[in-house]
Image (tube, grey):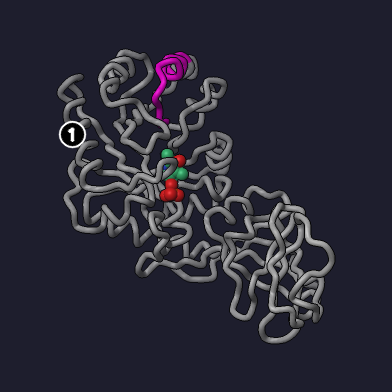
Amino acid sequence: MSAVTPRLEIDIGKIEHNARSLVSQLGERGISVTGVTKVTLGSPAIAEVMRRAGVKGIGDSRIANIRKMVNARVNSTFVLTRLPLLSEVDDVVNYADISFNSERDVIAQLSISARLAERQHGVMLMVEMGDLREGLMPKDLADAARMVLDSPNLFLRGIGCNLACYGGIAPDAQNMGALTGYATELEKAVGVSLHTISGGNSANLDWALSGSRLGRINNLRLGESILLGRETLHRKALPGLHTDAFRLVAEVIESKHKPSRSWGQHAQSAFGTLPDAGNGGDMHRCILALGRQDCDPEGLTPPAGLRILGASSDHLLVESLNGPLAIGSEHSFLPDYSALLRATTSPYVHQISQRVTPR
Ligand SMILES: *Cc1c(COP(=O)(O)O)cnc(C)c1O
C-alpha cells in the first residue's frame, strides 16, 4: 500500500534554500526579512527552516498559528501581521512580540493586557499608501504614535505598509519614497527613532532588487516568494529559487476512454460552469480524488501528459494525453498560492514535510 492521498509533500530543503537566497540578496541591500508562515497554517517545521536561513522574525496573520509555533518551541520573534481582534488581545500579548496596528481602541487594550501579563509588546503602525486595505491615513500617524509612546508596556517598533493585496497597487519608487518621508517626519514629530520601516510583501521584490534607491525601508515580510519562489506582481519565478517545494499528490479513481463532449440537454453544472466541449472524439478521461474541498483546482499545474478539464467538490477530471492511467496511480500537481492555502487548511489533505533537497 502506498501513502494516503490527497497529500501535500513539502520539501523543506527547497524552502530553506529560497529563504537563504532572499535573506542574502536583501541583506546586501540593508533589508531584513520577516518570514511569513500563514499559508502553511503556521507550520513549526517551516518556521524553523526559515529561522535557520536567517529571517529576522516569523510573521503570521493568525494568533492561533503563532501560538502553535511558540508552543512547538520555535525560537524567534513573532509578529502578528493582521490587525489584532479586540477579542484576542490577551493572546496577542502572550504569544506575539509585535503586532501591526491601526486602531486606537485596540492599542489601548493591548496596553492593558500587556501590563496584566507583565510583558512588553511592540507596535508597528500601518500606514495607508493607496492599496486601501489596512492602515492609518498619514495625517493620523503622529497622534497614534504619541498614544503608543504614552501607553504602559507598549513600545513603538516602527511603521509599515502593505501594497498589492487589495487594490493591486504596485510598490514603486514613489510610494516607497513617501513611506520613507513619513518615517522621517514621524521621528521628528514625536522625537524617537524607528527601528523598523517595513515596506511590504513579496510584491515589493521587483522594486527592492531592481537597484532603485531604497530610502529608509529596512524590512520586508515574505511568504509566497520564500515558499513558492515567485514574486507576486506578475508571478514570475525568481532567479535561482525553487518553484516546486510543494506538491499535491492525488490518486486515480476512474480511468476510461470516453467522448470528449457531454450529451443530453445542457443546463448548469454543480459549480455553475458549462462543461468544456471537446471536439467530440474519444479521449483518455480520468478522475482523480481531489476537488474543491481539497484545493483550488484553477490553481493547479498538472504534470506533463495531463490536461485538467474541470473539477467538482471531490473530483478532478483530466485528459491523459499519453494513454490510460492506472487505477490507484499517483500524480503530482504544483499548487499556486490559492491552491496551497486551500490545501493546507483542508482537513482532507495530509501533510508530509521532508528534506529532499539538501541545504
Ligand atoms: C500575508 C502577508 C504578507 C506576506 O505576503 P506574501 O505575498 O506571501 O509575501 C506580508 N504582510 C502582510 C500584512 C500579510 O498579510
Q: Is residue 172 magenta?
A: no
- Where's ligand 1: which quadrant? top left
* Residue 35 on image: x %, y %: 42, 48
Q: x, y (%) of residue 334? A: 57, 66
Q: Secondary structure at mark 1?
A: helix
Q: Is residue 100 left or right of residue 127?
A: right
Q: Which residue is mark 1?
A: 181
Residue 58 showing in the rendered view: no
Q: Quadrant of the C terminus?
A: bottom left
What is the residue that sits farthest to the front in this orientation?
265
Residue 6 on image: x %, y %: 71, 62
- Crowd rating for badge 1 (residues with CA inside 10 Å; few <14, some 14–19, many 20+): some
Q: Quadrant of residue 295?
A: bottom right
Q: Is residue 193 above or below residue 323?
A: above
103 left or right of 25? Answer: right
- Mark 1: amino acid: Gly
Q: Position of residue 183 (x, y in %)?
A: 21, 31
Tell me which residue sits at (56%, 63%) in the image.
246
Outermost bottom residue: 323
Q: Which residues are magenta?
A: 98-112
Please name the residue shown 74% across and 68% down the image.
Answer: 288
Residue at 24% across, 31% down: 194
Tally of numbered discs? 1
Q: Is residue 72 above or below residue 207?
A: above
- Give yes or no for residue 100 being in the magenta stretch: yes
Pick whichever, 200 or 355, lies toward us. 200
